[in-house]
Amino acid sequence: MENKVFFSYLGNTEKRISEFFEKYEAQQYFKPTDIYDSVFSYIRRPAKRLRPSVLLMAAGSLGGDDREKLAIPAAAGVELFHTWTLVHDDLIDNDNLRRGEPTVHKAMSERSKKSLGVSDGVAKEYGRDIAVLAGDIQHGWSIAAFVDCALHMSVDPMLILKLIKHLQSYVIGNLICGEVLDVQYGMAKGMDIFDIDEEKIINMLWLKTGVLYEFAGLAGALIGKNSTDFEDEQVLAIKNFAGSCGTAFQLQDDILGILGDEKSIGKPVGSDIREGKKTVIVYESIKNASASEKNKILSVLGNKEASPNEVSEVTVLFQELGGTERTGKLAKQYLEKALPHLDVISDSKYKNLLVLWADFMINRKF
């Protein structure tokens, strides 16, 4: 029953956020057609809208229904901010699928072959260029959405200015740091080139994923209170709760990337292995591997031409050597660390939704 309540809230959030996007006046400036289609590509695909939902639940937890409604533009802003990072991340990782459909750069590359009649090489460059530019527009649009909270929703303009500054300095700085570390770790042939260990991997995951969830909780809590006090006890509680849950989310996501099916995760299973992603799964497995098992893992990890059978063999090793088990335990630990933060928040339907979100983070099906 409670899961039904949670998923109903997510569905309602998706509806409200989608309506915001479709009615937004700035879309008239998204030209030409390839840019317009690219900007809306991921936005119009079915999604759980977890980050905007966290922002809205946080606002409701500290401000009730009225403040939750006022936070809609900010929730849309967080989703747009997340979306541009996905477009660029897919480009960096050379992924061809996102949510079960072609990534922006892949779709535009294929379109240019048909519409412009260009060669494969030129088409690939065109796809990359359009993806970069579409992400740039989404990034700018995310800030405009936050501004709407002050212009149209009676949220303190000073709060919105502070949130934008925080997003455009602390959040983006940490997020890109995490992305760079992910790229560097992926270049390492073994696990010791950059002296990579579990702590560094988890820090990288928090930078890439946890920091934006943390911001969603922070922004929602401050809008809920209509306060500019970033050090308020309840605000910090929701901020820290959301950040820890975000780390748990990414740890669980790494498991899904190994054990999930393509339909569920929306991208090819094994893509993280072929890209050479250094996860806790990889670290723990190599730590426990024999010399031959280690050589097998390292021969496939980062090999973009690895066969499905080779990827499958390594996936089995990750399970047998305790990599997926260790990662699952860590995800649960981060949730156990997160939940006590909510003790200072009064009981409400929104607080209950935050707890249900934490449960969802760890119980997503493979």
Image (cartoon, rainbow, N blue to C red):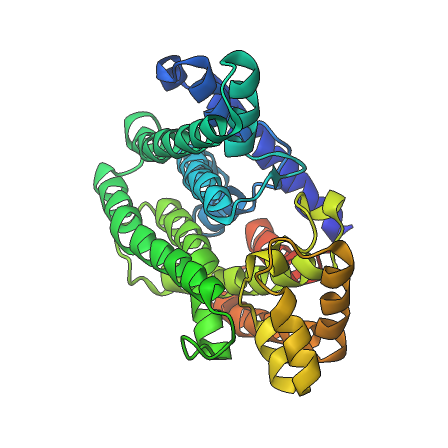
Residue 240 appears anywhere in the view:
no
Residue 4 appears anywhere in the view:
yes
On the rendered structure, is 48 left or right of 59? Answer: right
Tell me: residue 126, above or below residue 64. Answer: above
Task: Give 272 or 308, whichever is nearer the viewer.
Answer: 308
Task: Give 197 or 317, whichever is nearer the viewer.
Answer: 317
Tell me: residue 38, above or below residue 63. Answer: above
Q: Residue at x 43, y 31 (%)?
A: 125
Tell me: residue 183, above or below residue 338. Answer: above
To which quarter of the image does residue 53 belong? top right
Tell me: residue 77, above or below residue 26. Answer: below
Q: Residue at x 60, y 54 (%)?
A: 304
Residue 110 image offset from top left, x and y in percent = 57, 25
Q: In the picture, which quadrant includes the C terminus?
A: bottom right
On the rendered structure, is 306 left or right of 164? Answer: right
To which quarter of the image does residue 233 belong? bottom left
Count all numbered tags in the image, as a single digit. 0
On the rendered structure, is 238 left or right of 153? Answer: right
Residue 280 image offset from top left, x and y in percent = 57, 72
Task: Give 96 or 85, whichever is nearer the viewer.
Answer: 96
Q: Residue at x 62, y 41 (%)?
A: 48
Residue 271 image offset from top left, x and y in percent = 63, 53
Residue 90 image offset from top left, x and y in percent = 51, 43
